[in-house]
Image (cartoon, rainbow, N blue to C red):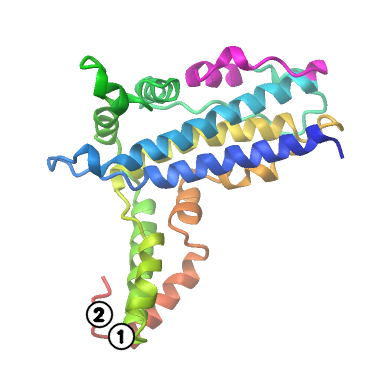
Amino acid sequence: MSTRWNYLVSETQFATELVVTGLRKLCTVPVRGDWPVGHDQTYPLHVGLHSYTSGLERLCKLTIACHGFVTTGTFPPLKPFGHKIGDLLDGVERLDLSKVPQLHKPPAGRPADDLDPTLTDALERFANGAGRYEHLDSLWNDQAAVATLDTWTQLCAQVTVSERVQYVLSIRTAVISAIRTLCTDGDLEASAFAILDSVDPPLSAPSIGVALHLYQKASWVASTLDVVRYYTHHDLPLLGEAVQDIRPPAEAFFQYSVAHIEDEHATVEELQEHFKRFPDLDDD
């Protein structure tokens, strides 16, 4: 098997993991309306954006590169794009998929986003360094703009999460609460609570709303990469499986990859049995 084959699979898995990790972290950014949140409480915003923008950039470049190879036989240079997220998204949108040989799947159109251009501009500002290094830059430059948190807060004010997402979030909260109850009942608090804390970061509904907008962008690029590489050239691997975690609809992604609820109905049934066992608990 060629080295190029392995590199493409590894890079696609890397990009997908970066996107998923970044989105999970962004869902935890605290936004509390009139209650001001300091920069020392919102470092997850920079952690999440660092991971997400890196993954999205890589996904876009992989898509453009593979399209170039299956249509011309050579990989195009990608360095000119740099970290320009907006140009990369535009570049994916401009790909002429009619030139892809043996096109087996209908291409998905680029999703419209009512948070744009502000959202994409914020991604590009962060990816290019002005956002990534804004806190460090502010130490030596009084004129350095520290704007990432303000922009995120403004975006959060423009979104609402669906009833479906709220429902899944309530199930997740109940599951974690049930596990803690079982640990207490089994005298495992000291052993288990530290582990639970690591898998139970607080989730913020407004931040979830913006994160799912970001998910739509990455999912569209992933679907385009899948189209470009679905049995279109024997010298390149199929990459659909490597991006499968970011292919479902946004609400399904939240359920499976953020809330970690695999089987909703089985989970609800188990919770109902749990509350029967502990009837003194508030099961709202």
Residue at the spot 39% in from the left edge and 60% down from the top edge: 198
Toward the left, the furthest residue is 34
The amino acid type of the residue labelled 2 equals Leu
Toward the front, the furthest residue is 140
Residue 144 in the image: above or below residue 23: above
The amino acid type of the residue labelled 1 equals Phe
Horizontally, residue 272 falls left or right of residue 40, namely right
Q: CA distance from mark 1 to mark 2?
A: 6 Å
Q: State yes or no: residue 81 in magenta.
A: yes
Toward the top, the furthest residue is 80
- Please provide the residue range marked out in magenta: 71-94
Residue at the spot 26% in from the left edge and 45% down from the top edge: 30
Residue holding disc 1: 278
Residue 151 at x, y percent in the picture: 28, 27
Q: Quadrant of residue 65?
A: top right
Badge 1 vs badge 2, beta-carbon distance below 8 Å: yes
Residue sitting nearer the eye, 117 or 114: 117
Number of residue marks: 2
Horizontally, residue 144 falls left or right of residue 84, namely left
Residue 208 at x, y percent in the picture: 36, 44
Residue 224 at x, y percent in the picture: 64, 30
* Location of the C terminus (image quadrant): bottom left
Residue holding disc 2: 281
- SS category of the residue bearing label 2: loop
Q: Which mark is residue 33?
A: none
Horizontally, residue 127 falls left or right of residue 12, namely left
Q: Taking the image as drawn, is residue 260 in sight?
A: yes
Q: Residues within 10 Å of mark 1 (few under 14, many from 20)?
A: some
